[in-house]
Amino acid sequence: MIQKVGKNLSLFSMTFLFLVFLLISGCQTQNKTFLKHKTFFFKVNRLVFTGFKPALLPGDEPGLIRDAISGAVFMAEPVPERVADMMTDLLFEKLIADGEYDLISPDQAMGAISIIVDSDKNFDLKPLSLFQEVGKAFEADAVLVGRLYRWRERIGADYGVQRASSVAFDLQLIRPADGALLWRGRFDKTQQALFDNLLDLATFLRGKGRWMTAEKLAMIGLEDLMNKMPGMARKDDEPER
């Protein structure tokens, strides 16, 4: 009888772990890209990175905003400029280390934007038109734009918090020639205790079982999006229109 109960418990444990594995595999990431699987080729050699900008600045009211490029609607909170500058530096360093692109820096991009705006007072200041012109100025294949929607720092320490870190941002890859959105990746995560969310095991392991700072959580997001960002010619992928 004891052996039978032991076998049943063992079978139950294995079944439970298998179901958890399936759920984790199916719900591992919140990042989405606008790519359909059709025959299509595009290659990004020269890339202009304009850096990150807050969707809302300190003093603005939190609320829903519509992205000027993708048209998507997001819930946004004010984010300090210093955080955007830090995120810009972090991603630019990663892009340099990756060595995948011929990079145009955010400083160069901002310099070109100033020249474009100052040279033509009648220039259409819509973000998409401006990014297209910047890309054309550098004869780039694509322009990479970042937006920050939320940045909440943890309140507490590595092994105990009153409030967990929470960040949300996205990256968009724009083709200068026609303004097409080649790719968009979004990271939106609030760290949770493992027992509160078994589906977030990957984040728990990457954080080494600790409550992460907002910067550390954002670093995980940058790595995830960089792994999804197209660099070389890809077959069977087409941007959504």
Image (cartoon, rainbow, N blue to C red):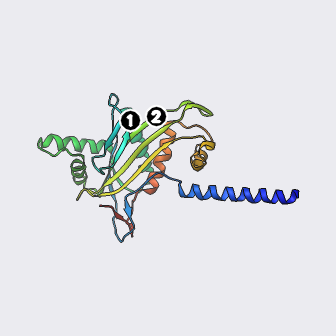
Query: Dot 2, how many residues are within 10 Å of its Cα: few (below 14), some (14-19), or many (20+)?
Result: some
Instruction: Examine the rendered structure and indicate whether residue 169 appears above or below residue 79.
Output: below
Q: Residue furthest bottom?
A: 39
Q: Which label number is shown at residue 152?
A: 2
Please determine whether, in this image, residue 16 is positioned above or below residue 86: below
Number of numbered discs overlaid on the protein picture: 2
Q: Give the image location of residue 239, x and y in percent.
A: 33, 62
Q: For the N terminus, which image quadrant? A: bottom right
Camera-nearest residue between 22 and 186: 22
Q: Is residue 119 left or right of residue 54?
A: left
Residue drawn at x 50%, y 46% is 220
Report how far apart the C-alphas of labels 2 and 1 lie in the structure. Answer: 9 Å
Q: List the residue tagged with mark 1.
A: 77
* Identity, as a three-letter code, of the amino acid under mark 1: Glu
Dots 2, 1 in contact, CB < 8 A: yes
Q: Quadrant of the C terminus?
A: bottom left
Q: Position of residue 13 (x, y in %)?
A: 73, 55
Q: Residue at x 51, y 40 (%)?
A: 216
